Image (cartoon, helix red, strand yellow):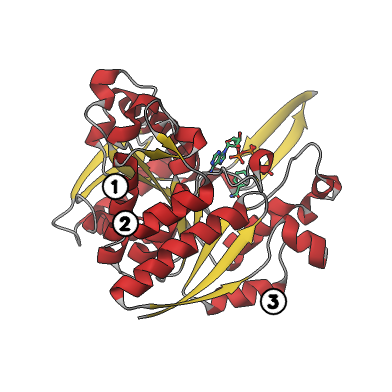
Amino acid sequence: MDLRITCIPGDGIGPEIVAEAKKVLDKVAEVYGHKMNYTDILMGGASIDVHGVPLTDEAIATAKAADAVLMGSIGGNTTTSPWYKLPPNLRPEAGLLKIRKALNLFANLRPAYLYSELAGACPLKEEISAQGFDMLIMRELTGGLYFGDRKTIEENGVLKAIDTLTYDENEIRRIAIKGFDIAMKRRKKVTSVDKANVLDSSRLWRKVVEEVAKDYPEVTLEHMLVDNCAMQLVKDPAQFDVILTENMFGDILSDEASMVTGSIGMLSSASLNDTKFGLYEPSHGSAPDIAGMDIANPIATILSASMMLRYSFDLDKEADAIDAAVKKVLQDGFRTGDIMSEGCTKVGCSQMGSLIAERIA
Ligand code: NAD
């Protein structure tokens, strides 16, 4: 298969971790007989330095012409970097918002998986972490409270702020379909999270999710109120497969789920539109404090490349091979500094990429 991939190395550790993800993808191509066609574009600070803006229209056109986008991370030190003296619409992060909008990326996926080898980093009680967990949070990304009308007014000398939470049935249906499609590739369980005991938007959410569920008889659907979900994530995370939820609830729950894994350098993510197209990136930032030192953990980006193969190219076997190679490297005792523990062998970013590539079978 010919894969057209736009790469955004970005800033800070971005170029180092994307190089390692490419190394692993190239090995997958060699073993499984595919052809990777990469085109790099600039975004964030790297684009500001060359073009004066965080993302050009030409770069967007290049991204649109590909089948998927693989990104490192963007941004610099927000206190010292000259990029943050610019107006907000010209700062590095504006590039990210612009590309998400231009590509209509409405579905955000964040897996939270506890590797038994890294269970020591999990902040939960041992009897809970011993069960392990493997969940994926599917968050609606372009609607709800963050995109509704908002204003602050003064009434009788009292300031009053108003935010509006709106969802129409089409916005709910398209993310629900994504959630069920992805559950079909996993353990076939969807937990739809809402606040249907209070909010009309949640009652509509529940109704539409139930309609969509009828087309997926193999998937078990359960509903959970968001406050209960926040508790269950720390009490019994093993119960979850796909958590499907709206924008603000997903924002909060996905950070909570990430934290219970305890390892920021391991967390991948994807943002999808209603075709197979997606943008894949680690959940962490550009870590300017360790940029250029060959000590960053490339695994989150390598696992993002695995998600890309699975969700944009339907190459499940190849994605499984990457996931298995990551697990094997951890079993073999190799660690970057951020996940280092006693008795393990410390390696740099580039060596970690090579060790994973070597284990692709
Ligand atoms: P960060 O995630 O970059 O770093 C937080 C801490 O985690 C740092 O100590 C860093 O060294 C460490 N860390 C992060 N990733 C690591 C990895 N792969 N291996 C080893 N250690 C790692 O968060 P921050 O410092 O708050 O942000 C730095 C910059 O990144 C800012 O400009 C911010 O806006 C940007 N950012 C970008 C994205 C993105 O590109 N999507 C996301 C978050 C933050």
Residue receiving disc 1: 328
Q: Is residue 32 left or right of residue 76?
A: left
Evaluate whether residue 298 shows in this view.
Answer: yes
For marks 1 and 2 on the same chain, the one whose residue lies earlier in the sequence: 1
Relative height, residue 273 to residue 133 (above, below): below
Residue 106: give x, y in percent of width and height: 48, 58
Residue 79: give x, y in percent of width and height: 79, 36
For badge 2, the amino acid type reads: Arg
Q: Disc 1 and disc 3: Cα gap in Å?
A: 40 Å
Q: State the SS at label 1.
A: helix
For marks 1 and 3 on the same chain, the one whose residue lies earlier in the sequence: 3
Q: Disc 1 and disc 2: Cα gap in Å?
A: 7 Å
Q: Are marks 1 and 2 in contact (CB under 8 Å)?
A: yes
Check mark 2 vs ligand 1: CB closer than 8 Å? yes or no: no
Residue receiving disc 3: 58
Q: Is residue 63 left or right of residue 340?
A: right
Q: State the SS at label 3.
A: helix
Q: Disc 3 and disc 2: Cα gap in Å?
A: 37 Å
Q: Which residue is at the front of the view, 218 or 347? A: 347
Q: Residue furthest left?
A: 218
Residue at x 58% of width, y 45% of height:
146
Q: Which residue is at the front of the view, 147 or 339? A: 339
